[in-house]
Image: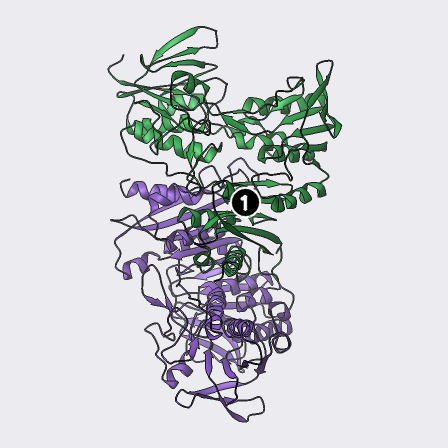
Chain colours: A purple, B green
Amino acid sequence: MNARTRLLVVGGDAAGMSAASQARRRIGPDGLEIVAFERGAHTSYSACGIPYLVGKTVAGPEDLVARDPATFRRDHAVDVRTGTEVRAIDLDRRTVEAVGPDGRVLTEPFDHLMVATGAVPRRPGLPGDRAEGVFGVQTLDDGIAVTAYLEERRPKRAVVVGGGYIGLEMAEAFALRGMEVTVITSGDEPMATLDPDMGALVRGAMAEMGIDVRTRERVSAIEAEGGRVAAVVTPEGTYPADVVALGLGVRPASDLARDAGLEIGPSGGIAVDARMRTSHEGVWAAGDCVENFHRISRAPVAIALGTHANKQGRVAGINIGGGYARFEGVVGTAITKVCDLEVARTGLNEAEAEAAGFAYETATMRSTTRAGYYPGATWMTVKLLAERRSGRLLGGQIVGRENSGKRIDVLATALWNDMDVEDVSGMDLSYAPPFSPVWDPVLIAARKLSEKLGN
Amino acid sequence: MNARTRLLVVGGDAAGMSAASQARRRIGPDGLEIVAFERGAHTSYSACGIPYLVGKTVAGPEDLVARDPATFRRDHAVDVRTGTEVRAIDLDRRTVEAVGPDGRVLTEPFDHLMVATGAVPRRPGLPGDRAEGVFGVQTLDDGIAVTAYLEERRPKRAVVVGGGYIGLEMAEAFALRGMEVTVITSGDEPMATLDPDMGALVRGAMAEMGIDVRTRERVSAIEAEGGRVAAVVTPEGTYPADVVALGLGVRPASDLARDAGLEIGPSGGIAVDARMRTSHEGVWAAGDCVENFHRISRAPVAIALGTHANKQGRVAGINIGGGYARFEGVVGTAITKVCDLEVARTGLNEAEAEAAGFAYETATMRSTTRAGYYPGATWMTVKLLAERRSGRLLGGQIVGRENSGKRIDVLATALWNDMDVEDVSGMDLSYAPPFSPVWDPVLIAARKLSEKLGN
């Protein structure tokens, strides 16, 4: 081993490279060697941007790359090795086994190990799901592949399997290219992280855009002709398809860590503490592969989201570099834009509140985004959940048009601080006619829920 | 006195009529008589909307009226008497003296009195400030008058005296009508509720729109010709003017209450507790005429804002009706839109933090409103103040383009909960490329300030 400390990073996306950068900020190349292994060809890209690449909202894949390997080598003295897959971790010997682009197996020692292996898409495991024209949408390479396929084949009919964020974003991307689009989801409504009454609003907007949403259907097979996808089959029907996107969500890519003997939590993510330490000294993990502490349910959850990956990677890197930083958990905030609708949620939805054992009450309010008389005022619906006895806010959901979604952050901040809805309803939020009615929609919903609870 | 309780309301705008409606919700006409006196012709209108009326962003004054007197009479059994000015309150006898539209003086008894007299515009008290063509911008009647003047006279040159919210909004309104506009302010930069470094960004946007902003100039006279305004004079120059708007802010209209013997606070507003009770039993006050508790400075402040008036009126009405409600104070949140810039602030600015005795540190970050690669991404600047020792957030300011201003509500919520900037920087705010870079601009600013404080 070198005289200087050696940090190996497994995974060159947001979490891994944030950790590398932060560690480097604290310790220069003379004190710390950093080697990062990335299976694919790209580092630090926005996976969340893939649907916008597919829908031609952004011009090319290079737009989604925040910093490429050459930048990390030059500006951060990080030895980035793309096309290199780590196959095993030996915690006792403190080495990893990696296979390089030429197929050679390397054994590399570490003092610190940063595990940032991300997530893997769930695949239905059905006959035909490996046919040509069936795509996952997880890595930038996936995004490049599906875009190339669309450019070359000019398919007319797209089927999206799965009605979550990525599924609906892909459905819109296909629709923006002028394709006929069908979304198949097993849920009562699309966007299962919302309650069905709010998800129904999303389905309405998709229908307006001509997207056919099939709810309560489970895909039983994907049919191929000549090796290429031809249709998606459910017990209720057969949907012809020239291209299929699998948007069934992801699970933490924690197999490597599990095989090495690191503790894995009940969510399937690598167990870490607030400093992003795993169960083994000097081994750190961050990003989609880890388990998060949910501040409201107090339960461990796996949430794949770039913003968490960035924050956690930064925390790990500061700690690796000898500093002190903590990741204080999540409240389950998420947002997306689907067919001109803004969709956002935070905290617990009804099913989650039930599962967490809360007795809760809800209130839903439709309001306007601006003063009613101000041009551009449009609708938004806010739904809130609160604990019945205490009035404590448990969660919020927003579906609306322009300028509605980001208001979820007020609720996320309120949840972060364990506020009750009566207190929320009195908050000093900004008001001016171009931005809000005189009672902000979030405040109206909180007031209504507080009144329902007897205040 | 009647067998039923009698509530008199002085002032028919947001605070007074909210109180009337809430009291009515709790006690029907058989138990409670409600009489509301309004000096002008209108009830419950949006004074904040006046610049949009002047700038023709909204079509007519009726758009700004939430509920007219007839509606209150019909739906809420409130005896609204417009054109009726209350001249005196006799607390011992529990009567008010009012002058009706016909000039007759009435003496009306009350059990409960709701004082909602609003604010009065500050006038420079200069020769010429009563000339034709010089307008305050406080009441809907003011808005109607200035609009009529513009339509009839088609003036070419407007001068706005004062660089606060209403002044800048009026400047934009005149510019939208194609007029040459000069703004004269005594401050270092326009928008004195922001620190000068942030106010400079506002000045830049106004200059781009062709509005001439003269800073550090004090108006010494308004010149008239034939009784009509001709120019505005400062020691630095004479600015020809066909119309002048006075946007020098407002002060609480608390003279009536003061003369009656009600306690007035150091801010000049009527002193009230959190239930909106004045110093005299059964006498309530709410809206622009009262003093607010500032949760950060812990000092009394007078803030004229429709959203506070609505909330406070509601609180007073619930309490008058026998319920229980509290107004838990303000954190000084405000927002406006000036020349395509969104401008927002909350908490304390540097001068206010200084005055409140805080040792503080600041951080300012320019960031993008969306992921950099997402179409429509534009800039926003966030400035934060935190207490030096504790890291406690003291205030925030945002100046930016589309979709930046409303993010101030995250900071307002954080202030409401006494958060420190390190905790703010880790919050689970929503992220998706159309809404935010992967690090939300508010979080970046908090992180930078926390780092400055040694975290």
In this rendered view, identify the residue nearer to me: A5 or B146.
A5
Q: At 50% across and 44% down in the image, what residue appears?
A: B353
> Would you place residue B6 above or below residue A320 in this image?
above
Q: Position of residue B216 (x, y in %)?
A: 67, 35
The residue at which mark 1 appears reads as: B350
| Horizontal side of residue B440 vs A445, given as left or right | right
Q: Quadrant of residue A157?
A: bottom right
Question: As displayed, is residue A263 above or below residue B294?
Answer: below
Q: Position of residue B99 (x, y in %)?
A: 45, 10
Closer to the camera in the image, B102 or A2: A2
> Compared with residue A194, is residue B148 higher up or lower down, i.e. above or below?
above
Residue neighbourhood size for the residue with mark 1, other residues' Cα within 10 Å, grouped as few (<14), some (14–19), many (≥20)? many
> Dividing the image into 4 quarters, which one contains the C terminus of chain A?
top left
Query: In this view of the protein, which residue sits in the foreground, B248 or A389?
Result: B248
Quarter of the image holding residue A449?
top left
Q: Secondary structure at mark 1?
A: helix
Image coordinates for residue A112, horizontal then vertical, percent: 46, 81
Q: Is residue A57 visible?
A: no
Which chain letter goes with mark 1?
B
Q: Is residue B50 left or right of residue A263?
A: right
Q: Position of residue B123 (x, y in %)?
A: 59, 23
Q: Amino acid at mark 1?
A: Glu
